[in-house]
Image (cartoon, rainbow, N blue to C red):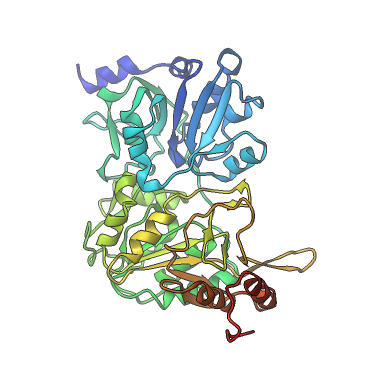
Amino acid sequence: MSFKEEYNKKLVSPEQAVGEVKSGDWVDYGHFTCSPTFLDPILAKRVDELSGVKVRAVTYPGLAAVAQADPTREHFCYNNWHFSGGDRMLHDKGLCNYVPLLYHEGPSYFDNIIESDVFIVKVAPMNRSGYFNFGPSCSMSKATANRTKKIVVEVNASVPYCYGGFNESIHISEVDHIVESDNKPLFSLPSAPVSEEETNIARIIMDEIHDGSVIQLGIGGMPNAVGMMIAQSDLKDLGVHTEMLVDSFVDMYLSGRVTNKKKQLNPGKMVYTFALGSQKLYDFLDHNPCCATYSSDYTNNPARIAANDNMVAINNAVEIDLYGQVCSESSGIRHISGTGGQFDYTFGSYNSKGGKAFICLTAAQKNKKTGEVKSRIVPTLTPGAIVTIPRTIVHYVVTEYGMVNLKGRSTWERAEMLIGIAHPDTRDDLIKAAENQGIWRNNNKRG
């Protein structure tokens, strides 16, 4: 049987495909832009005939229909490994739970611990060798497919074909059902606005990046600002080893800043596990041999991150306490995003020869109505806040008021250093708190 004949044999209607889901099943969705946005609302229509169906997703673009269809959560129970804006809204309504994840470990969960009954994933059209490509969402997709009972692919011609290192594709022989979708364009992530404070943080970090550095950028305005500054700089032969590929990497490459020539691991390649950005990014990735996507157990493995000299990891945080504990994923008990790969890259980059890991945050938030300044450097984390990076792992912390290196520092040194880069209006209160907590020496600097 030819691949085309096998394709036609497995091609079914959307209703037939979601008919594979039975009551009590665990259903896994494709990740990020390859979430099954075509089949999700069709599955949601089965709400009254199903019960106890558990769904796992990753950064679903928009609002998952299965979650909205059942406010009781008796029919569909929706869960997520890393929240999008829509997932956050569902969480606030009690319709989404977070699944804690160290991203480099994710594939091993499917290898050793959990199984899936049905995997539904958006893919690029089949190539002549019978492979469907996971596009810009390699992530944990192949590991999920390997441990599921039924695989449904949602074919979309808008998915770019992304060359990979491994685990970037699935063969038609492994697929149970094929659905041809509406071919709508992939979700486009708008560029985050960059504040003056974030620009100042980016300038501080730029002084720490040198020719031949290998870059990882997280999501948000500040990493975006760094990317824009790199593209406009005179830096040479930068490399890319990152979990998330964003638009600014395209600008860095097209400006000639990124060549990947100096990398020890995968020289010549921009390495990533998923991409999220504008159509410009997806067009850049399509059949582009300078890019290589790998599953997250490769890109986020701390040992592999450390294998590149001069690794530079740049990530955001929600708050940090005077002990150096970093929360990057929740505001108290309100979950915002996820651990993702921040731990992986902070730990891996520090262990790189010449490597640096930066946790960045604006020093304070200002209430637009009252003008009150609320410090993001806090005496102790907000009750319920999740420790994303333990104090033992944190390397550099940067605000618009400066940068400190917390490695090897005692609790009183950490308190002094962090208060030194806090917003000036909050420093006296932080000193009083540090004194009450027994982590402030009388001869520490003040002001």
Residue 194 on image: x %, y %: 57, 65
Quadrant of the frame with the N terminus: top left
Name the quadrant containing residue 229: bottom left
**Residue found at x 47% / y 29%:** 182
Q: Look at the picture and state if 269 lies above or below 406.
A: above
Residue 222 on image: x %, y %: 52, 65
Q: Residue furthest top?
A: 49
**Residue found at x 66% / y 27%:** 71
Q: Is residue 284 left or right of residue 331?
A: left
Please tell me how many numbered marks the rendered image carries: 0
Residue 422 on image: x %, y %: 60, 74
The answer to whether one can see residue 124 in this image is: no
Q: Look at the picture and state if 102 lies above or below 147.
A: below
The foreground one among 80 and 255 is 80
Name the quadrant containing residue 431: bottom right
**Residue found at x 45% / y 14%:** 16
Name the quadrant containing residue 214: bottom left
**Residue found at x 64% / y 68%:** 364
Quadrant of the frame with the C terminus: bottom right
The answer to whether one can see residue 239 in this image is: yes
The foreground one among 86 and 180 is 86
Q: Residue furthest right?
A: 370
Q: Residue furthest front?
A: 438
